[in-house]
Image (tube, rainbow, N blue to C red):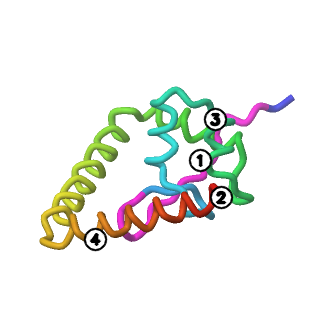
Amino acid sequence: MILKTTQKIPLTLWQDGSIRVKGSRLLLDGIIYAYRQGEIPESIFDSYPSDAYTVADIYAIIAYYLSNKEKFDKYLAKREKAAEKIRKEIESKSDYKEKTSELRKKILARQKELQK
């Protein structure tokens, strides 16, 4: 029997700097966030089903993350900081509260309609 000593990790770096599962738009961020919340690879896969990857790929990605935790934690912190900056910019716009209030009303109305 011959054992493989290397395994390809199905991750790819996009032009925007994000790391995603190869062949999909699924972000590494989502997988790691779910893992940190206690989800197991099977439930992560069920949350983001795709023909582009398997449960085994999710396991491999988590194992790769754990083997390179310091590097990936820096990447994730940078992404969180960038997201927070964008969130603050959006919320600082003068019409933000008005638009979100309108959207919330539409969503609530739609929910009531669907419950009938």
Q: Residue 39: horizontal and vertical position, in percent?
A: 57, 31
Badge 4 is on which residue?
99
Magenta region, residue range:
3-18
Q: CA distance from mark 3 to mark 1?
A: 15 Å
- Eye-nearest disc, 3 or 1: 3
Label 2 crowd bin: few (<14), some (14–19), many (20+), radius 10 Å: few
**Amino acid at pointer 3:** Pro
Badge 3 is on which residue?
41
- Eye-nearest disc, 4 or 3: 4
Q: Nearer the viewer, residue 74 or 107?
A: 107
Identify the residue at horizontal 28%, vertical 48% (top origin). 80
Is label 4 in a helix, a strand or a loop? Answer: helix
Left or right: where 34 falls relative to 56: left
Q: Which mark is residue 9?
A: 1
Q: CA distance from mark 1 to mark 2?
A: 47 Å
Badge 2 is on which residue?
116
Is label 2 in a helix, a strand or a loop? Answer: loop
Q: Does the residue at mark 2 contact the one at mark 3 (Cβ under 8 Å)?
A: no
Q: Earlier in the sequence, mark 2 or mark 3?
A: 3
**Amino acid at pointer 1:** Ile
Q: Earlier in the sequence, mark 2 or mark 4?
A: 4
Residue 96 image-quadrant placement = bottom left
Q: Residue 35: horizontal and vertical position, in percent?
A: 51, 33
Left or right: where 47 falls relative to 2: left
Q: CA distance from mark 2 to mark 4?
A: 26 Å
Q: Which mark is residue 105?
A: none
